[in-house]
Image (cartoon, rainbow, N blue to C red):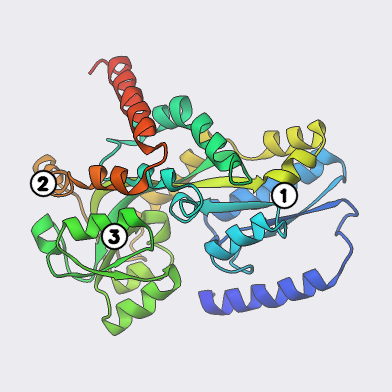
Amino acid sequence: MNMMIFRNLATLLLAVWLASCGGGNGGQVVNIGGTSTPNTPGEAMWLNFKRDAEAASGGALDMRPLIYGQLGSEEQLLSGLRRGRIQFANLSAQVTSTLVPELSLLYAPYLFEDEAESDFVYDNYLTSIYRDLLAEQGLYLLTWYEIGFHSVYSKQPIIMPADMVGRRFRVSSSINARLFAQALGADVIPLGFGEIVPSLQTGLVDAGENSISLYARTGISAEAPHLTLTRHVFGVSVIVADQRWWDAQTPAIRKILTDNFPSVTESRRETRAQDEADLADPALGIQVHRLSVEQRAAWRQATAGVTEELLDSIGGRSREIYAVILEGKRAWAERDGI
């Protein structure tokens, strides 16, 4: 189904749904906001959460997954969450960095070498820090959700950093994306996610960067079929709840919600499997460019100064957190025998 038609239909269904005041099963209504694409691990995560939490609560919870963008953009979801209009949401770290600037540090170029290293550092060093920072802004961090490593997509192949010079390169509103593109000499063009496909079609932009999950099946790959696996930042989102609402729940309800949300291990496995399947799917027509060790080193070198610029711009606890990340990376290297 065409995504625009799907979203319009979803919005109509939402209006009908909200017009009926009573809960679907008589339990406490829990509105969940998201911007999932149909038939993806992200959609399955929320639908499974609804099923399992409702069953475990014995009818005490009426989970309402409004996960197809019915409530608007991520920025609108964040606003709704803080105003108590929704209780749960899946928000990218980049968008949530408007509240917690230190989240931008997680998108420093080449901060992590691979998934195994990032998993170790997130699980053992970062979760408690960011849970505290988000709590200060009225959000409870339930868990992380993997978006995956970002790479560069384009209409024509981009293999080396020099190929980026002068490219009309879409970036999000986040500072890390802008600094990355500027370091490579691109023509930086900030656009919302929903503007990417039409801007590729009109020629306003001819390249950008994102994770496979936000590229392959969102219409972008059809307009920009070249994907260069720079794997320059490891993307995550945060599964968060309204802290006031969360604190008001009984310990039993909080346990049901925590225990029945898919584990981060499960979401990582599903996301990574889907990424590999998408890259190999001939129907998508993605032309994958895998970099040699030397080529990836050139990208790392070209963006080497971005981390320090980020630290200067973010302030707050960013340097403290960066030191913690480096400590975690050292611990991983020692554990891994490097």
Find residue 323 and report its image quarter: top left
Q: Which of the two residues, 273 or 73, is positioned nearer the viewer here?
A: 73
- The Cα–Cα distance between marks 1 and 3, rounded to whole angstroms, is 37 Å
Q: Is residue 156 left or right of residue 233?
A: left
Q: Residue at x 47, y 28 (%)?
A: 123
Residue that badge 1 annotates: 50
Q: Which mark is in front, 1 or 3?
A: 3
Residue at screen point 25% across, 43% down: 307
Identify the element where label 2 is drawn. helix
Q: Are marks 2 and 3 in contact (CB under 8 Å)?
A: no
**Badge count:** 3
Marks 2/3: CA–CA distance: 19 Å
Name the residue carrying label 3: 178
Distance from disc 2 to disc 1, alpha carbons, whole Å, reads: 45 Å
Q: Disc 2 designates what residue?
A: 298
Amino acid of disc 3:
Arg
Q: Residue at x 53, y 30 (%)?
A: 128
Depth check: give the residue in front, 95 or 223.
Answer: 95
Residue 336, image quadrant: top left
Image coordinates for residue 105, horizontal then vertical, percent = 36, 43
State whether residue 160 appears in this view.
no
User: Looking at the image, is mark 2 or mark 3 earlier in the sequence?
Assistant: 3
